[in-house]
Each structure stands twice: as C-alpha cells, then as structure tokens.
Amino acid sequence: MVTNIHSREYQVSAARLGELMDALGTTEDRLWPHHRWPAMRFDSPDGPLGPGAAGGHGPIRYVVESFDPGLAVRFRFTAPKGFIGWHGFDIEAISEGRSRLRHTIRADVKGAMRLTWPLALRWLHDACVEDALDNAARALGEPLPQRRHSLAVRILRRLGRRAR
C-alpha cells in the first residue's frame, strides 16, 4: 500500500486557497505546475472538476471521483496499470487567515508497478507535487523556498524525454 502525503501552510484564508484548487485543469490553473510537467487536462462538457470527468497528466490517468468546491477534489486512478487507488487535494482552515493545502495518494501497487513506483514514479511525483505547492505560494504572493529538483529527478526526466 502506498500512502504519500505532501502539505504546506499558507498565510491566506482557506477560501483563497480553494480558488486555486477549483481552477485545476482549466485555462486559469495557477496551481498545477504545467510549465515543468505534463498539463492536467479533463475531457468533460460539465467543467474540469465535475464528478465523472476523465483526464490526467501525461501517462497518469484518472476520473474525478468527488469534488467539494473550495475544499477537496479526489481522483480515482485508471492508469498506469497496477496503480489502484486515488489521489487528491484538500484544504484545511487552520486559523483566521491561515490554511493548509494537502495532496494525498493512497494506492495499492501490483505487478511491475511494485518496482516502478519506488524506483521512478515516486521521485517524479514528489517533485511535481512540491512544484504545485510552490505554485500556490507564488500565486498567493508568498515567499518560495530555493529548491532544485534532485539529481534522481533530473535524470529520470531526461530519460523520459529521450523515450518520447
């Protein structure tokens, strides 16, 4: 079982943070790090985050399982094969003018994914989600940590570009 959680606190109301999350996959998306990673896209006439909307980013595919505007969105994985579970964002109000954005994955890994997740996908996922949390800080006018992708992530990304 994979459980992977990333979170960050921001000096803004949960409502402001919710506006960022609610725009995921739209032309107004300032949260997803589409400048460095495959864009999050959905194929739904009812809007990107409507329940049942199918989409994903790169080879990672999912369906919107639930969406509570301003509070949480959960995606059920449909690919890659052997990655069975969900991922999502949720927002927690901590105090007046302070909130937390959290991204969680909970999934079972089967077959080749037992090796693919710990050796490659986990590292790429962690870097992508941290880039999303940085985007939230940037969009909210908060200071950003000085960070570079790890050597492992840079190598994996280079190998991925060559494979395409």
Image (cartoon, rainbow, N blue to C red):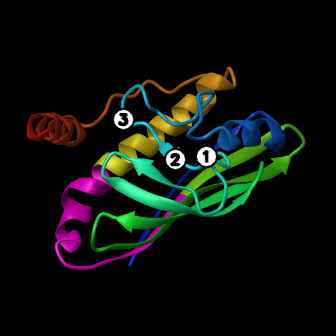
Q: Amino acid at mark 3?
A: Trp
Callout 1: few (<14), some (14-19), or many (20+) C-alpha neighbours within 10 Å? many
Where residue 88 sits: x, y (%)? 57, 58
Label annotation for residue 42: 2
Mark 2: which amino acid? Phe
Image coordinates for residue 66, horizontal then vertical, percent: 66, 65
The x and y percentages for residue 121 are 27, 55
Q: For residue 106, which numbered disc appears in the image?
A: none
Asked if the stretch drawn in magenta spans residue 118, the answer is yes
Q: Judge the density around disc 3: few (<14), some (14-19), many (≥20) Cα neighbours within 10 Å.
A: some
Does residue 65 sit above or below 35 in this rendering? below
Report how far apart the C-alphas of labels 1 and 3 lie in the structure.
18 Å
Q: Earlier in the sequence, mark 2 or mark 1?
A: 2
Which residue, given by chain and number where applicable, does mark 3 sit on?
A: 37
Residue drawn at (50%, 27%) of the image: 145
Nearer the observer, disc 3 or disc 2? 2
The crowd level at tag 2 (other Cα within 10 Å; few <14, some 14-19, many 20+) is: many
Residue under label 1: 48
- Give the spatial CA distance, label 3 vs label 2: 16 Å
Quadrant containing the C terminus in the rendered view = top left
Residue that sits furthest to the front in the current view: 45
Q: CA distance from mark 2 to mark 1?
A: 5 Å
Residue occupying the point 55% across, 38% down: 133
Q: Dividing the image into 4 quarters, which one contains the N terminus? A: bottom left
Magenta segment includes 116: yes
Q: Residue at x 63, y 27 (%)?
A: 28
Q: Earlier in the sequence, mark 3 or mark 2?
A: 3
Q: Which residues are magenta?
A: 104-123
What secondary structure is found at the residue carrying circle 2?
strand
Q: Are marks 3 and 2 in contact (CB under 8 Å)?
A: no
Left or right: where 15 falls relative to 29: right
